[in-house]
Image: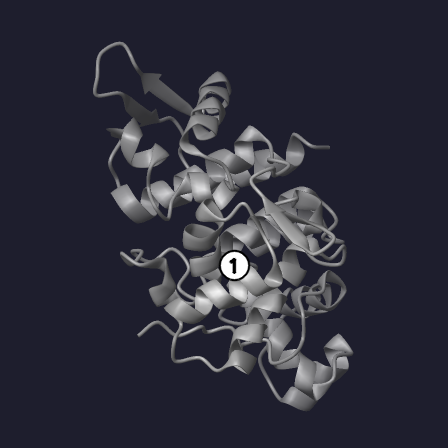
């Protein structure tokens, strides 16, 4: 049965101010290795908070094996205070896969835990919902979880709605008791191109062209990751083509997409540079 896998943070919500302390340490020669007491001194984080913040940084794609990931290095250099919506989008993208990253996705997103279930199963069906709606619906999926365990979903909606976290990408907003999805403030084409390139590596490896439908309708693909539908994603693909990130062949079905990038990280750098 699916397990929620949302206790990695213990009771510490995502907070960029604390995350930045982890990134600074990860950028130093010793990284995040060594004695806990020393890392506490270097980060000025308490012993109960260091571990959860390391987990947030890792799941958000910014830290790998105790050091900044390639993406984390770009973020740290381009957005040193983690203020850009691009950084929020990047963190969301990786958080949406739980702790599995860009492994081959399961048939059922819930098999990877509560965060993949929330992004790739729940939100496409429930664009407006309350906290009770989410908890009651997820209880049917994660039926081995206790009511207290299911309350960990609050750390997901807090991550998307709190200013100190990811609220500036508007993947999820809140009005009163209602949470609202499906109206994100989408990032620029280069970051969307980066997401496409990473998902392409995951799903199609070295293929140079794939069927457009396989991009538009992948259940754990680009559309739900951006919080939009297939029709809206096609509009974004048109923009990617205008930026020479992809080529589309739509004269005769089946329509195809051809990759025109060399390295996804180049697209990530361009995403930040284009916003300067």
Q: Quadrant of residue 203?
A: top left
Residue drawn at the location 62% of the way across and 89% of the way down: 35
Which of 126/168 is in front?
126
Tell whether 176 sits left or right of 218: right
Is disc 1 placed on a helix, strand or loop? helix
Which quadrant: the C terminus? top right
- Neighbor class of circle 1 (other Cα within 10 Å; few <14, some 14-19, many 20+) is many
Which of 231/175 is in front?
175
Q: Which residue is mark 1?
A: 95
The location of residue 23, given as percent across then percent down, is: 66, 64
The location of residue 178, given as percent across then percent down, is: 66, 52
The location of residue 134, given as percent across then percent down, is: 53, 61
Residue drawn at the location 30% of the way across and 28% of the way down: 212
Residue drawn at the location 38% of the way across and 67% of the way down: 141
Is there any visible trace of residue 56 in the rendered image? yes
Report the colour scheme.
Answer: one colour
Which quadrant: the N terminus? bottom left
Residue drawn at the location 33% of the way across and 45% of the way down: 201
Which of 259/192 is in front?
192
Tell whether 214 sits left or right of 21: left
């Amino acid at each position: 049965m699916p397990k929620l896998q949302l206790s990695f943070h213990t009771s510490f919500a995502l907070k960029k101010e604390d995350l930045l302390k982890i990134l600074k340490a990860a950028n130093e020669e010793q990284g995040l290795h060594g004695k806990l007491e020393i890392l506490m001194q270097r980060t000025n984080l308490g012993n109960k908070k260091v571990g959860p913040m390391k987990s947030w940084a890792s799941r958000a794609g910014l830290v790998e094996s105790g050091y900044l990931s390639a993406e984390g290095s770009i973020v740290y250099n381009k957005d040193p205070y983690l203020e850009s919506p691009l950084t929020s989008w990047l963190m969301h993208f990786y958080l949406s896969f739980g702790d599995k990253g860009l492994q081959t996705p399961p048939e059922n997103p819930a098999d990877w835990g509560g965060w993949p279930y929330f992004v790739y199963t729940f939100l496409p069906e429930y664009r407006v919902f309350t906290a009770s709606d989410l908890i009651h619906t997820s209880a049917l999926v994660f039926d081995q979880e206790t009511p207290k365990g299911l309350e960990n979903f609050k750390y997901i909606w807090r991550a998307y709605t709190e200013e100190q976290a990811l609220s500036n990408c508007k993947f999820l907003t809140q009005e009163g008791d209602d949470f609202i999805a499906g109206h994100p403030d989408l990032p620029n084409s280069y970051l969307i191109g980066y997401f496409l390139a990473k998902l392409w590596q995951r799903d199609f490896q070295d293929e140079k062209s794939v069927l457009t439908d396989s991009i538009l309708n992948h259940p754990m693909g680009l559309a739900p990751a951006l919080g939009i539908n297939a029709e809206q994603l096609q509009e974004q693909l048109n923009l990617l083509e205008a930026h020479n990130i992809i080529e589309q062949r739509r004269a005769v079905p089946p329509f195809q997409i051809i990759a025109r990038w060399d390295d996804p990280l180049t697209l990530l750098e361009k995403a930040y540079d284009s916003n300067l």
